[in-house]
Structure formats: structure tokens, C-alpha cells
């Protein structure tokens, strides 16, 4: 499916997931409906509770409810600042442009992703502390089925237990604060952040600060306090081109 064609002529989506990561339900209007096949459709809403697959974060899932149908949200994409929902009709008629719907998150999945994403920022700090050098990232997936961060350094399996220990030591109960920062002031606000040389040219950055740990430009969803993460578990490390891929997960303490 040609996603740029689907979003052509539409306004930017209001991103509720950035305004309030804890919002579980929200109203919306259907702006565009494109049938794929059978009961499967691509939809664009005027606002989105659902975070797309982007910025190293896994796509949200959930449902859209209308008095005439129930629509399962299976994956979420973004193109040109417009969020595109892909899914299928579970019951009822096909969606139509102009429909007023209620969005509902698969909250269990979203909250896990929030915990994993904030944990990824904590692991960034622990890796730097254990290796003794600032390390950039190559990529990440903060979410199911397997969370990982890719680093531009060779990480030996022998130091995994040390990285895990430091990650959990610095968790504590730190505040996680979201800030909107003008690009001219960015370098005064960020610290401990990887990849500052690869940032896009935008007027304002969204910065996620884990108090006393790091402040990183990030468009993901996060918990309010690190105590919500639980325990960080490092699973394994693999060699990849240009560095290492570190697999991790979180569990309740």
C-alpha cells in the first residue's frame, strides 16, 4: 500500500500519545478510509492515541469503537507527520469518513512499552558507566517481542551482569520529565545523550529527562517515575556490524 498517497492532502495528526502517555481512551474523527482487502483497512484519524512504529518504539495496538462497528488496530505507521492506522473490522459495517469513534489502547501492551523505553534510557547510562566511554546507538526496539538497543561498541558478555547491576542501582525512584526545547537551547538542556550529531533539523525538540541520569531528545512514551519500571533484566548480547546488540526486558520486582 502506498502510504504517502493515503495521507496526501491531510492535516498533521494531533498526537495524544505525546500529550499524555497514560491516556487510555480518546474521541476522534475518521478523516480517510482506504480498503486493503476483505475487512482490512488503512484509516487516518484527526487525532491519535496510538504511537506508531518509530523512534525505536514498537507500534501500539488497540480498538476503535463506533455504534455500528468495532475495528481492531493491528499496527500504526507515520508519514509526513500524519499517523496511519491499519487493522480490520471485528464486527459491523466498514468505517466511513466523518465517523466519530472512540479510540481505546491495548493498555497492557502500551504500559509495558513505556517501561521498556524508559529502561532503555537507563541502560544507555549504565553502558557508558561500565565501558568508561560515551557510546552512541545504532538502533533500538523498545517493545515486544524482544527489546534491544544497538551500540557502537563491542560489549563483552562478561560485562552484562555489571551493566544490569548498575542499571538497577541507578533506577531508584527518579522523576521522568518531558520538556519542549527550542533547537537553539538544546545543547544547554541535554546531557548523557547519544547521537546528537544525527538529530533532524527541527525548531523544537521533545527531550525526555530521567532525573540525574540523562536528558535525551525522544518522541517515545515513558513512565513518570523510574520506580514503575520494575527490574531491568539483560538477556544476552550479540555482535552486529559496527557494534553490539544488547537484549533486555523488565519484570516486576
Image (cartoon, rainbow, N blue to C red):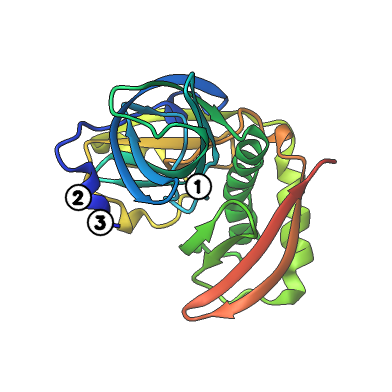
Query: Do residues under tags 3 and 1 come within 8 Å of each other at their CB atoms?
Result: no
Q: Quadrant of residue 248?
A: bottom right
Residue 23 in view: no
Vertically, is 130 above or below 120? below
Query: Do residues under tags 3 and 2 come within 8 Å of each other at their CB atoms?
Result: yes
Image coords of residue 59 (percent x, y): 50, 47
Q: Label 3 to label 1, Cα distance in Å? A: 19 Å
Q: Which residue lies under the disc numbered 3? A: 2
Image coords of residue 136 (percent x, y): 46, 63
User: At numbered mark 1, what does the secondary structure look like: helix, strand or loop?
Assistant: loop
Image coords of residue 214 (percent x, y): 53, 43
At 43% from the left edge and 22% from the top edge, which residue is drawn?
101
Q: Quadrant of the C terminus?
A: top right
Q: Which residue lies under the disc numbered 1? A: 59
Of residue 216 and residue 241, the one placed in the foreground of this image is: 241
Q: Residue furthest right?
A: 253
Crowd tier of the residue under label 1, counting other residues whose Cα lies within 10 Å: few below 14, some 14–19, many 20 or above = many
At 64% from the left edge and 41% from the top edge, which residue is drawn?
109
Q: Earlier in the sequence, mark 3 or mark 1?
A: 3
Q: Which residue lies under the disc numbered 2? A: 5
Vertically, is 234 above or below 232? below
Q: Label 1 to label 2, Cα distance in Å? A: 21 Å
Q: As drawn, is 161 to the left or to the right of 75?
A: right
Q: Earlier in the sequence, mark 1 or mark 2?
A: 2
- Closer to the observer: label 1 or label 2? 2
Q: Label 3 to label 2, Cα distance in Å? A: 5 Å
Q: As drawn, is 167 to the left or to the right of 197?
A: right
User: At numbered mark 3, what does the secondary structure look like: helix, strand or loop?
Assistant: loop
Amino acid at each position: 500500500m502506498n502510504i504517502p498517497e493515503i495521507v496526501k492532502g491531510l492535516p498533521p495528526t494531533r498526537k495524544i500519545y505525546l500529550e499524555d502517555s497514560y491516556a487510555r481512551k480518546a474521541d476522534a474523527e475518521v478523516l480517510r478510509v482506504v480498503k486493503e482487502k476483505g475487512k482490512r483497512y488503512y484509516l487516518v484519524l484527526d487525532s491519535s492515541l496510538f504511537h506508531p512504529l518509530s523512534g525505536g518504539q514498537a507500534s501500539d495496538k488497540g480498538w476503535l469503537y463506533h455504534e455500528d462497528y468495532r475495528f481492531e488496530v493491528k499496527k500504526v505507521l507515520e508519514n509526513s507527520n500524519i499517523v496511519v492506522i491499519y487493522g480490520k473490522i471485528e464486527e459491523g459495517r466498514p468505517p466511513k469518513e466523518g465517523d466519530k469513534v472512540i479510540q481505546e489502547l491495548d493498555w497492557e501492551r502500551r504500559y509495558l512499552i513505556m517501561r521498556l523505553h524508559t529502561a532503555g534510557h537507563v541502560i544507555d547510562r549504565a553502558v557508558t558507566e561500565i565501558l568508561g566511554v560515551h557510546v552512541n546507538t545504532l538502533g533500538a526496539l523498545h517493545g515486544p517481542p524482544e527489546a534491544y538497543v544497538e551500540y557502537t561498541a563491542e560489549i563483552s558478555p562478561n560485562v552484562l551482569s555489571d551493566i544490569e547491576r548498575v542499571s538497577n542501582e541507578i533506577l531508584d525512584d527518579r522523576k521522568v520529565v518531558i520538556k519542549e526545547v527550542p533547537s537553539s537551547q538544546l545543547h544547554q538542556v541535554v546531557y548523557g545523550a547519544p547521537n546528537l550529531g544525527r538529530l533532524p533539523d527541527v525548531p523544537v525538540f521533545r527531550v525526555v529527562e530521567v532525573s540525574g541520569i540523562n536528558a535525551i531528545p525522544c518522541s517515545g512514551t515513558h513512565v513518570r517515575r523510574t520506580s514503575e519500571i520494575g527490574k531491568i533484566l539483560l538477556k544476552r548480547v550479540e555482535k552486529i556490524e559496527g557494534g553490539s546488540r544488547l537484549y533486555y526486558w523488565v519484570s516486576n520486582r
